Image: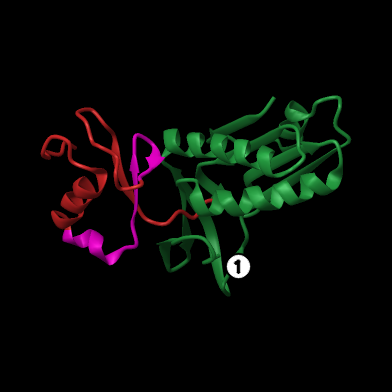
Chain colours: A red, B green
Amino acid sequence: MELDIDPDSTSRRAFQKIVAERPQLSAYKLHFAVNQEYAEGGEIIREGDELAVFTPVSGG
Amino acid sequence: MDLFELTTEPIDIGSVARRVVPPECGATVTLDGYVRKFTRGRETLYLVYEAYGPMALKEMGKLIDQARRKFEIANVGIVHRVGRLEIGETSVVITVAAPHRQAAFEACDWLIRELKRAVPIWKKEVYADGEAWVGGEGSN
């Protein structure tokens, strides 16, 4: 899906928007990734970046 | 050579080990993680694993690089299966080759713990009377 955000938004800002628009996510502990790397919060999000929100992992 | 893969096919444990062994090494330690029938006293019928594939592979590669900085090891192989797995089937294999066994044991233990903490793969336990996605390191 696509996300409209202000130019030069940080990943923190982008994920806050994603979560705010989907209240059902607040029931979970969440992890965030930008372009398949765990997000630090300060990354600047650019057009075409891949953002992911997921619950704690349980592989193995 | 290292290897890290996701597969929907049964894993041949021995072949994972053979593919990473360099001649200068004296030992490989291989972890075979498989589907357990009882978890927290509840009987599991089967498991379903899903991965965020591209990121899972990147994270596996990073873990191997970190392990090589922390331990005196040579090559690492990690193969994780996804999809439906029956009781007793192998879900993950981690093989570490090293000149001496102690480093291989330590690195293998570190790698499975880090994999369970950081690699985006999830498992759903299916029981006779329901199912549940398992949430995070330490819960199993």
Q: Secondary structure at mark 1?
A: strand
Rendering coords of residue B47 (x, y %): 51, 54
Give the residue at mark 1: B38
Q: Is residue A52 visible?
A: yes
Is residue B10 shown to the viewer in this render? no
Q: Nearer the viewer, residue A13 or B79?
A: A13
Q: Residue at 77% of width from left, 35% of height from top?
A: B14
Q: For residue A39, which quarter of the picture? A: top left
Q: How many marks?
A: 1
* Residue A51: percent from left, percent from top: 28, 39
Residue B122: % across, % down: 45, 51
Amino acid at circle 1: Phe
**Would residue B97 appear left or right of B70 to someone viewing this image?**
right
- Quick one: which residue is furthest to the bottom in this view? B41
The residues colored magenta run A23-39
Compared with B124, B5 (above or below) is above
Which residue is depicted at the point 59% across and 32% down? Answer: B4
Chain letter of the residue beneath label 1 in the structure image: B
Q: Residue B54's image quarter?
A: top left
Q: Residues within 10 Å of mark 1 (few under 14, many from 20)?
A: few
Q: Is residue B93 magenta?
A: no
Q: Nearer the viewer, residue A7 or B140?
A: A7
Nearest to the observer: residue B132 or residue B68: B68
**Could you tell whether B1 is left or right of B8 in the image?**
right
Quarter placement of the N terminus of chain B? top right
User: Which quadrant holds residue B65?
Assistant: top right
